[in-house]
């Protein structure tokens, strides 16, 4: 194998290892907790979600932490109070999301969305897209 190919292979392996380490570091920077909701059909309720940083990471005050792309598993089964839910920075450094939902049909409805979350450690800022998987259980 020529030295050029060996160099390319070595650089590629190094980039892969560094990328994998950065991805693992980001995954270990936060914990997500979700409190599902139960309500009667037509009754407004909310799903609670909290992102907490761990291991010396801090949620960014300057970043627009938000939840976007909200959807339910079945069309017209759930109405959302807002299309974008802004996160609220709490005194303990966590970011809380109050996701307003109103079920329109009885049964369990899967709720999906994407958190956009900014955090930092030692002067380095990171941003992540984190999936939301939640549920609202609607009774008659």
Image: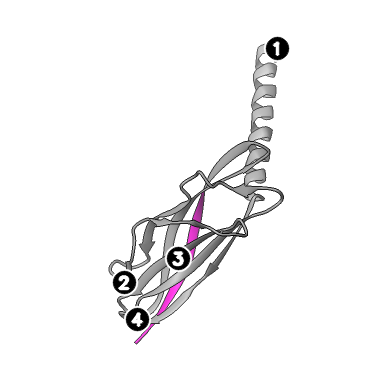
Q: Mark 2 points at which residue?
A: 77
Q: x and y percent of residue 3 in the render?
A: 70, 12
Mark toward the start of the polypeptide (3 vs 2): 2
Q: What element carries label 3?
A: strand
Q: x and y percent of residue 56 in the render?
A: 70, 48
Q: How crowded is mark 2: few (under 14 residues within 10 Å), some or many (20 or more)?
A: some
Q: Mark 4 points at which residue?
A: 106
Mark toward the start of the polypeptide (3 vs 4): 3
Mark toward the start of the polypeptide (4 vs 1): 1
Task: Farthest residue to the front: give it.
Answer: 91
Measuring 49% from the left and 55% from the top, which residue is drawn there? Answer: 131
Q: In this view, does 134 lie above or below 62?
A: below
Q: Which of marks 1 and 2 is in front?
A: 2
Q: Distance between the residues labelled 3 and 2?
A: 19 Å
Q: Which mark is residue 98?
A: 3
Q: Name the residue under label 1.
A: 3
Q: x and y percent of residue 78 in the render?
A: 33, 70
**Per the image, is 104 magenta?**
no
Q: Is residue 104 left or right of residue 23?
A: left
Q: Distance between the residues labelled 1 and 3?
A: 57 Å
Measuring 33% from the left and 81% from the top, which residue is drawn there? Answer: 41
Mark toward the start of the polypeptide (1 vs 2): 1
Foreground residue among 97 and 36? 97
Mark toward the start of the polypeptide (4 vs 2): 2
Q: How crowded is mark 4: few (under 14 residues within 10 Å), some or many (20 or more)?
A: some
Quadrant of the frame with the N terminus: top right
Foreground residue among 16 and 119? 119
């Amino acid at each position: 194998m020529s030295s050029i190919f060996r160099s390319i292979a070595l650089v590629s392996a190094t980039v892969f290892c560094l990328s994998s380490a950065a991805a693992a570091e980001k995954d270990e920077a936060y914990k997500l907790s979700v409190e599902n909701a139960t309500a009667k059909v037509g009754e407004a309720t909310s799903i609670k979600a909290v992102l907490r940083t761990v291991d010396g990471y801090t949620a960014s005050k300057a970043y627009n932490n938000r939840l976007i792309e909200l959807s339910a598993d079945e069309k017209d089964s759930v109405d959302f109070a807002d299309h974008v839910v802004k996160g609220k920075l709490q005194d303990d450094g966590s970011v809380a999301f109050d996701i307003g939902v109103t079920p329109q049909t009885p049964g369990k409805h899967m709720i999906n969305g994407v958190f956009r979350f900014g955090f930092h450690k030692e002067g380095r800022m990171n941003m992540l897209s984190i999936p939301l998987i939640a549920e609202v259980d609607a009774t008659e």
